[in-house]
Image (cartoon, rainbow, N blue to C red):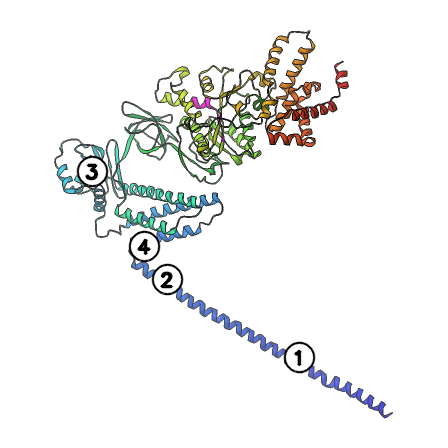
Amino acid sequence: MNILFTVINVLILFVIVRFALLKPIRKIIAERKKLIEDTKAEAEKSKEEAAKLVQDKEAELAKVDEEKKVIISEAKSKAMSDGEKIVAQATAKAEEIKKKAEFSGKETHDRMIAQVSREITELATKAAEEVASKNTLKPSQNAVKTVYDEFVENAAEDKARTLEKSEKSDEKEEPNAELIYVEKPDAVHLAALSNIVAEKTGLKNVRFKLTEDKSIGDGFIIRTAEHEFDWSKSGRLASLKKKIEDEIAKLTKDARINGMLFESGQVISMIKENINGFAEGAFLSTDPAEIGYVKTVGDDIALVKGLRHAEYGEIVIFENGVKGMVQDVKSDGTVGIIILGDDEKIYEESKVVRTYKMAGVPVGNGFIGRVVNALGEKVDDGEEIIADGYRAVEQPAPGIIDRKSVSVPLETGILSIDSMFPVGRGQRELIIGDRQTGKTAIAIDTILNQKDKDVICIYCAIGQKSSTVGQVVRTLKKYGAMDYSIVVNSPASDPAPLQYIAPYSATTIAEYFMYAGKDVLIIYDDLSKHAVAYRTISLLLKRSPGREAYPGDVFYLHSRLLERSSRLSDELGGGSITALPIIETQAGDVSAYIPTNVISITDGQIYLESDLFNSGMRPAVNVGLSVSRVGGAAQTKAMKKAAGSVRIDLAQYREMQVFTQFSSDMDDATMNQLKYGADLMELLKQPQYHALSLTDQVVLLVVATNRILMNVPTDEISSFKDKLLAKFRSEYSDICEEIIVDKDISEDLKDRIIKAAAKYVDECYPPEKVKNSEI
């Protein structure tokens, strides 16, 4: 009993302690815990505030350091002379431009180098202009005196001897030179200039007509009848810019080879040297530019007096910046120049300057996939084209030793051409026919068939409508051919000089790839319009007209163009240019002047006939008049064996067709021959943009020439051949693979093709069904 009461008391005590004591204890613990957490949070906050305070102090110290640097930098800048400051700013800017040039891939690399080069050139030229305007590098000398002194010093003449010579001149004679100045030179400088001009130009007793002209900005200009010394501000800056461009070009050439940007030290030293040299006149040439003056201008032709030493094909620059090309050098001292641009702002007596450079165009891999004009300038919406270099428009054709015989086929994908008139790489094959007979269609199909064959294609449009060329470009893009093609376009709206130069420019671009070991296909569409453009130029230059009003050298016009297409020897890389020139005839007259010329130059022709075209035979190739003189050597053995008798069979068919067209009673042999010929003609029909591979062509020719298709109705040949080719691709892929690998057909392979085709023909056209239909 006592134990029971004891247990009860203990339980009561436990309950009292639990509710009376534990609750306050828990409350105290909770309060202590909260106090600890608050203290910890406050400590963290204090820590953050301390850290922020440290950061603020460090920022203030950094700001103070930055301000110190700025003050020191400003002090240093102030301590520098104005000229030195400009040089330092220019070099710093150049370094900044260089650092921004990050590139990936060759095209981006080349584009970045070109951009950097342009910016640095402009930067250095601008800095030099600032130096010249402030004239700070020679503060103790008079500015106008300095420029005359520089000219005289650069000419390396003794002033005393110069003065002595000039004093002997007859002052009563008329002036034969003009000195345009901002500040008039003194007598010593005037005499020195007189002697220098006499030495440089060959004039005797130089007498100046003095003309003040503040618009030239600074310096002076000396003009004689045929020469000009431009030491004005703009002239000297132009010389500086050209010098910098030449030096940058050397740096960028090495940079492209090495795959990196040029070194900063090279750029900085080059800028310093050129800016300082400009201010001191150290590198400026005292050689005069040879000039002439426009006598007459019109129809994109300028007749210029002067330029006595200009060469045929040389580029000249008119006063408004438009370029021209010397095309005629006359015995009376005048020069005929074709204007490569707008002639609206070229007037009589405007100045023309020699460049001493032959006409050239930029070339490079950057042109692939682009549309350019006759001068190699982009006319599409793409980025600026980065050129790998420049080549002269007129180039000599490769010599005999430099050539190699044509032995590699260039497959057009057109059955009638590849089988009977094969084209080899390095060949010139003329496409000739009347208007609207499918000449351009054959050329475009040939370009499309070069996909994945490592052939670069160039389509040169001469005198075509812009809408027509636009359609060609859209077609090439649609079928992915622009990835390996270049379009050179000189539309009908272009002046005759640009149409004249277009095919030469296109060939120059093609030669760049040929000499790099590539195979190139070039289309001239068309050379009839090219000859017309040349005739226009010649008549405007008052050359004597010949047959059909063409000048006497019109044959040479096309021969020197087409002879540049060839296959190079292995020593020169083994590249090739295959040319497909197009000539438009009038009413099928192949005996006209231009057609006969080009036929005699090329290695064969594909003649397209209007009657065949209108009858539905497309491509409308006339088998009798078409020929390939060298392409047979390039044909694969498989194609040569498969197409052996096709041309003869077609000729016999055409002849028999003529004799039997009025006959009503024909024997079975004649009927079979006519059926076979009609089947061949139907087989050779091919829709545009549907190229056939070598395998397809060989299979069709083997099947047709072995008369497997005799049971197929003639009007169903076109649809049946597509089914037959699909059958071979799906069920007889081993045959196709063997043709691709061996490029030849053995008797065994030929028998297998015949058996497979005969089996499929019997499935589609059972003999009983054919016999019943004949009955």
| Residue under label 1 | 30
Amino acid type, residue under disc 2 in the picture:
Val
Residue 85 tag number: 4
Q: What residue appears at the point 26 percent right and 51 percent down from the top-left corner? A: 137
Assign a secondary structure to mark 4. helix
Q: Is residue 243 left or right of residue 261?
A: left
Find out whether the residues at labels 2 and 4 contact each other: C-beta distance under 8 Å: no
Quadrant where the image shows the N terminus: bottom right
Residues at marks 2 and 3, CA–CA distance in whole angstroms: 51 Å
Magenta span: 520-531
528 within the magenta span: yes
Amino acid type assigned to the residue bearing label 3 in the image: Ile
Where does the image place residue 208, in percent across and percent down from the top left? 19, 35
Q: Secondary structure at mark 3?
A: helix
Q: Name the residue carrying label 2.
A: 70
Tell me, for residue 320, which label it has, or none. none
- Give the residue pinned by disc 3: 196
Vertical order, 122 against 307 (above or below): below
Query: Residue at left 75%, top 84%?
Result: 18
Which is more toward the observer, 370 or 658?
Answer: 658
The crowd level at tag 3 (other Cα within 10 Å; few <14, some 14-19, many 20+) is many
Residue 595, how many percent across, how many down? 47, 18
Q: Which badge, 2 or 4, is on the more N-terminal residue?
A: 2
- Crowding around mark 4 (Cα neighbors within 10 Å: few <14, some 14 to 19, many 20+) is some
